[in-house]
Amino acid sequence: MTSQEKNMLRKLDYPDSAREALPIIENLIITRNKHDIAMDFIAEFVFREKKDDSRGMYGKNPPKLSSIEEFQLVLVLCDFFSKPGPDATRNAVFFSLFGGSISRTSVLNKLISTSISGSIAPLLCASGVWLQQLGSSSLPSLELAQCIVRDFITFSNKSSEQLKSLPMVAPRFVANFMTAVTDLYFNSSRGSLVGPPELLLEVITDWVSENPSICLASQQQLALPSGAIAMPPMTALSGLIRWCVLAPMIQNTKQTYSKLHLAILQSLMEAAPPNTAPPTAINSQHLGLIISTLQNESDQIVKKNPGINLKNNPFLSTSLERFAQAIQVALTSRCIFGNIPQLICRLETLPNNKLLQIVIKANKPM
């Protein structure tokens, strides 16, 4: 049957071939042992990737769709994913279409931007699962986060209504987008500390302030096909803590960071797992990376100002106090998993701070 379907699709013009191929692809994906055939249909009829050798393999750099064809495909995909159907099937089709393919990033970015503009919940929900399964710190996820920032933040004077209402439309997408986008800023592994655009900061602050549990939306049960393995969810909490803690180190004293810090503390209090469940919200290793950055920034202050008393540096004091508050609330709420005793010991390597010392003393293993 697939040979007849292929012959039929090859007679159609693009994007009609893609439109007619998608229901066939969906049926192949939900049929056991048909996934390879589905991927073949996706490559040929959806993305027009031509086989380029006698073995029938697709090249590493397949021909790209033209800008017009990409636009046509985005419209076809918006229509297809908007139709009623099981979430697990929709998620499986979305992941089969995009997986971790860098060559399809352009279409994906345009598709998600269009979905945000049109508040297309089914597509955004599917892409939220895609972000989570692929990993919010993976290259395709980070590229998508950068695209959203570019389309809705960099070229905007104010936040769009679609962006403001996004947590109500697709909470998992928002949670995983925040996890990805926090990796782009105040990240010492990317070089010098650079904060997020002010509008992005305001949007995320509003999201978390108005819905303290939004960061935990990634921990809701995933709708996956039978036999699929759900990847462990990450939250944006450690990344957002990093933003608030490191902002003063570049002498950024915007009130928005104070508001975001308070919202994070509220989120941490609401993130407490049931007594019988292990903590899953924050990896202690991610907090350890903040400690390393604070140490490096403190060393730079001393190097530039030999003999300086770090206790008198108001920016460092603010950073340490915010960090101490976040860690204490997270520990009290049982939000941190991993090697907590090691985390507490590492806190002792930071410059002396009264509040931080209280937190260390209260939580140091006997």
Image (tube, rainbow, N blue to C red):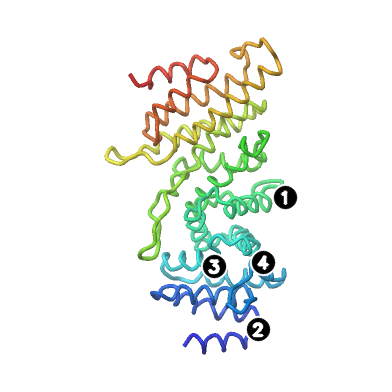
- Helix, strand or loop under label 1: loop
Neighbourhood count class around disc 2 (C-alpha, 10 Å): few under 14, some 14–19, many 20 upward: few
Q: Which residue is mark 1?
A: 155
The Cα atoms of the two marked residues, 2 and 4, are separated by 23 Å
Task: Assign the C terminus to one quadrant of the image.
Answer: top left
Q: Which residue is mark 3?
A: 97
Horizontally, residue 213 falls left or right of residue 111, namely left
- Residue reaching furthest to the left: 276
Disc sitting over residue 61 in the figure: 4
Disc sitting over residue 13 in the figure: 2
The total number of labels drawn is 4
Q: Earlier in the sequence, mark 3 or mark 1?
A: 3
The mark closer to the camera, 2 or 4, is 4
Residue at (40%, 32%) from the top-left corner?
A: 339
In the rendered image, residue 63, in percent from the top left (x then y), is placed at 69, 71
Horizontally, residue 58 falls left or right of residue 340, namely right
Horizontally, residue 220 falls left or right of residue 143, namely left
Q: Earlier in the sequence, mark 3 or mark 2?
A: 2
Residue at (62%, 60%) from the top-left corner?
A: 102
Q: Earlier in the sequence, mark 2 or mark 1?
A: 2
The Cα atoms of the two marked residues, 3 and 1, are separated by 29 Å
Circle 3: residue type = Leu
Neighbourhood count class around disc 3 (C-alpha, 10 Å): few under 14, some 14–19, many 20 upward: many
The mark closer to the camera, 2 or 1, is 2
In the rendered image, residue 212, in percent from the top left (x then y), is placed at 46, 40
Circle 4: residue type = Asn
Circle 1: residue type = Phe
164 above or below 58? above
The mark closer to the camera, 4 or 1, is 4
Q: Please say if the residues under marks 3 and 2 sit with CB atoms less than 8 Å apart.
A: no
Q: Please say if the residues under marks 4 and 1 sit with CB atoms less than 8 Å apart.
A: no
